[in-house]
Image (tube, rainbow, N blue to C red):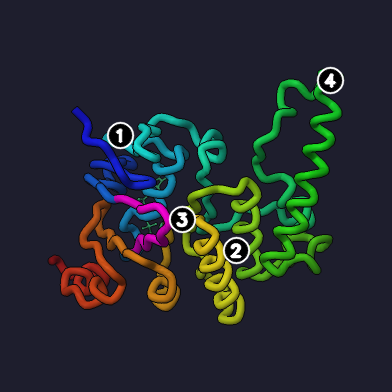
């Protein structure tokens, strides 16, 4: 009998091996609705693998993923947007020769066109959806402060601007949960403040977040609760203040056996 989950997203006893290496090794933790949950830990702790398993990009060898109490362990990644879950990537994979605007339009979408585009009757609806998507994309570029760069090749964006574009892409589908993989990495201080402001604003609008991040300032500013991971599992959880005082956390970061 599987116990019910009250969390927005919960993982139970996840394991994932890559060859001889255990990237996840009995990882259990939860993200609560309405909160920003930090996922921190040293390099190689399994944080990105956890996000991949949570969104169906990587299939776990063992364990389960529950979204709103529903088992989504074997749901494939392309179905997560429709379930209200979006993510960003540690390394942003933009198509550098396309413009910022075009990159955003290429984001996966919830559109009725696919498969029926050829149908004459579907065309009008498809066109209306394309127009609506373009409007939405423009509004989002404005929101993340990239509107003036809409027609520039995205390859020319700074690290921080690429992270903001990736966030805009995630927002296009109006998700209820966004999983961010190091949104602060390679981002200059002024854009980092912009990132913090945006994430806070989205939280106030009801969006929940899972935040993988190394920048402890960002984590301290944003997170309601933090799970510290080490060696593929959850080591400790609590407020940022509490976990940063925890001896086991300091030891995990220093690579000393706890
Ligand atoms: P983190 O994001 O916490 O730095 P990762 O989840 O990226 O950690 O990686 C956890 C471990 O799994 C690392 O040792 C990494 O090298 C390994 N790993 C991750 N993805 C793969 C992969 N696709 N193939 C082989 N090893 C991988
Ligand atoms: Mg990572």
Q: Is label 3 within 8 A of ligand 2 (CB to nearest ligand atom)?
A: no
Start-end of magenta stretch = 30-40
Q: Which residue is mark 4?
A: 121
Name the residue nearer the viewer: 192 or 46.
192
Is 34 a magenta residue?
A: yes
**Residue in view at x 25 percent, y 47 percent:** 28
> Considering only vertical position in the picture, is 134 above or below 145?
above
Quarter occupied by residue 197: bottom right
Spatial CA span between label 1 and label 3: 27 Å
> In the rendering, which numbered label is found on residue 163?
2
In the drawing, does residue 159 fall left or right of residue 226?
Answer: right
> Considering only vertical position in the picture, is 158 above or below 23?
below
Q: Position of residue 148 (x, y in %)?
A: 80, 68
Identify the image quadrant of the N terminus. Answer: top left
Spatial CA span between label 4 and label 2: 38 Å
2 and 3 marks in contact (CB < 8 Å): no
Count residues near mark 3 (Cα–Cα under 10 Å), then give few for <14, some for 14-19, many for 20+: many
Name the residue nearer the viewer: 149 or 92.
149
Q: Position of residue 136 (x, y in %)?
A: 74, 51
> Considering only vertical position in the picture, is 189 above or below 56?
below
**Residue in view at x 43 percent, y 61 percent:** 211
Is 232 a magenta residue?
A: no
4 and 1 marks in contact (CB < 8 Å): no
> In the rendering, which numbered label is found on residue 208?
3
Q: Which residue is mark 1?
A: 61
| Secondary structure of the residue carrying numbered label 4 | helix
């Amino acid at each position: 009998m599987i116990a019910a989950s009250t969390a927005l997203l919960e993982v139970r006893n996840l394991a994932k091996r890559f060859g001889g290496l255990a990237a996840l090794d009995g990882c259990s933790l939860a993200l609560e609705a309405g909160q920003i949950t930090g996922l921190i830990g040293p390099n190689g702790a399994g944080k990105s693998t956890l996000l991949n398993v949570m969104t169906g990009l990587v299939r776990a060898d063992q364990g389960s993923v529950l979204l709103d109490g529903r088992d989504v362990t074997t749901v494939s990644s392309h179905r997560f947007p429709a379930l209200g879950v979006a993510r960003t990537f540690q390394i942003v994979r933009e198509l550098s020769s396309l413009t910022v605007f075009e990159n955003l339009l290429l984001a996966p979408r919830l559109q009725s066109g696919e498969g029926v585009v050829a149908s004459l009757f579907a065309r009008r609806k498809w066109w209306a959806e394309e127009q609506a998507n373009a409007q939405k994309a423009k509004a989002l570029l404005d929101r993340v402060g990239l509107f003036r760069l809409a027609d520039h090749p995205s390859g020319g964006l700074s690290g921080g601007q690429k992270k903001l574009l990736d966030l805009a892409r995630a927002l296009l589908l109006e998700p209820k949960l966004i999983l961010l993989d190091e949104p602060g990495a390679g981002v200059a201080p002024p854009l980092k403040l912009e990132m913090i402001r945006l994430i806070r604003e989205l939280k106030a609008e009801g969006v929940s977040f899972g935040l993988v991040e190394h920048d402890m300032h960002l984590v301290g500013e944003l997170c309601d609760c933090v799970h510290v991971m080490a060696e593929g599992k959850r080591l400790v959880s609590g407020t940022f203040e509490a976990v940063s005082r925890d001896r086991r956390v300091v030891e995990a970061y220093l690579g000393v056996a706890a």
